[in-house]
Image (cartoon, rainbow, N blue to C red):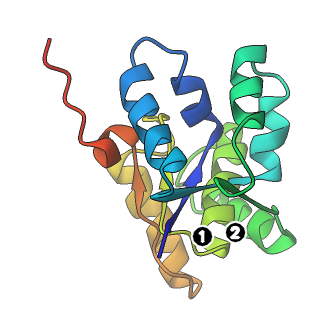
């Protein structure tokens, strides 16, 4: 069975960022080979409209078999608000919370992000999962693409 990984918007941008391009390229090779399904939301799609054309074009060129669109639901918005209310992150990180809540609601295998401040951060992950458990949701595995590809920079 293919694994369903939620990609936040930063993952797509990572393809064209010198710091993250190698790991992100390897991640998308796993998508193209059918090992991983790239789950994204309508929020991701909306955020990508403001991205540079090369990022938008890369996203648009993924085939229907390689990606799965999920909706940001009222339930996800309420969960995202709870992360803010519980002070996991501040109000300015609401969209980050929506990504996490959407991934939680849609029961993906894990969420991938290059956002180390508000998402891929051990203290934030504990906070998100504490709220999830308190409200009866499963915990969410959150990682950077580097952890998935096993790429180690040898420089």
Left or right: residue 152 compared with residue 125: left
At a point 33% along the width and 48% down the height, the residue shown is 148
Q: CA distance from mark 1 to mark 2?
A: 9 Å
Q: Quadrant of the C terminus?
A: top left
Q: Look at the numbered discs 1 and 2 and tell me whether their residues touch, using CB distance below 8 Å.
A: yes
Q: Which mark is residue 50?
A: none
Q: How many marks?
A: 2
Q: Helix or strand or loop: what does disc 1 sit on?
A: helix
Residue 68: image location, x then y, percent? 71, 60
Which residue is the extreme one toward the bottom?
136
In the picture, measured across the screen, residue 152 lies left or right of residue 68, that is left
How would you rate the neighbour count of disc 2 (Cα within 10 Å): few for under 14, some for 14-19, many for 20 or more?
many
**Image x and y of residue 49, in percent:** 85, 28
Asked which secondary structure carries label 2, the reply is: helix
- Decide which of 106, 96 is in the foreground and name it: 106
Lower sequence index among marks 1 and 2: 2
- What x and y, as percent, mark residue 95? 72, 45
Q: Nearer the viewer, residue 149 or 140?
A: 149
């Amino acid at each position: 069975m293919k694994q369903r990984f939620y990609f936040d918007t930063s993952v797509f941008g990572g393809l064209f960022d010198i710091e993250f391009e190698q790991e992100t390229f390897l991640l998308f090779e796993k998508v193209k080979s059918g090992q991983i399904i790239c789950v994204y939301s309508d929020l991701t799609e909306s955020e990508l409209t403001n991205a540079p054309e090369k990022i938008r074009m890369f996203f648009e060129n993924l085939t229907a078999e390689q990606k799965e669109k999920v909706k940001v639901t009222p339930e996800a918005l309420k969960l995202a608000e709870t992360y803010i209310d519980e002070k996991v992150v501040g109000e300015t990180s609401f969209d980050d919370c929506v990504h996490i809540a959407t991934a939680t609601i849609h029961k993906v295998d894990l969420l991938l992000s290059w956002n180390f401040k508000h998402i891929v951060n051990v203290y934030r992950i504990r906070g998100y999962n504490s709220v999830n458990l308190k409200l009866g949701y499963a915990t969410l595995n959150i990682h950077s693409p580097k952890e998935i590809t096993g790429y180690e920079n040898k420089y």
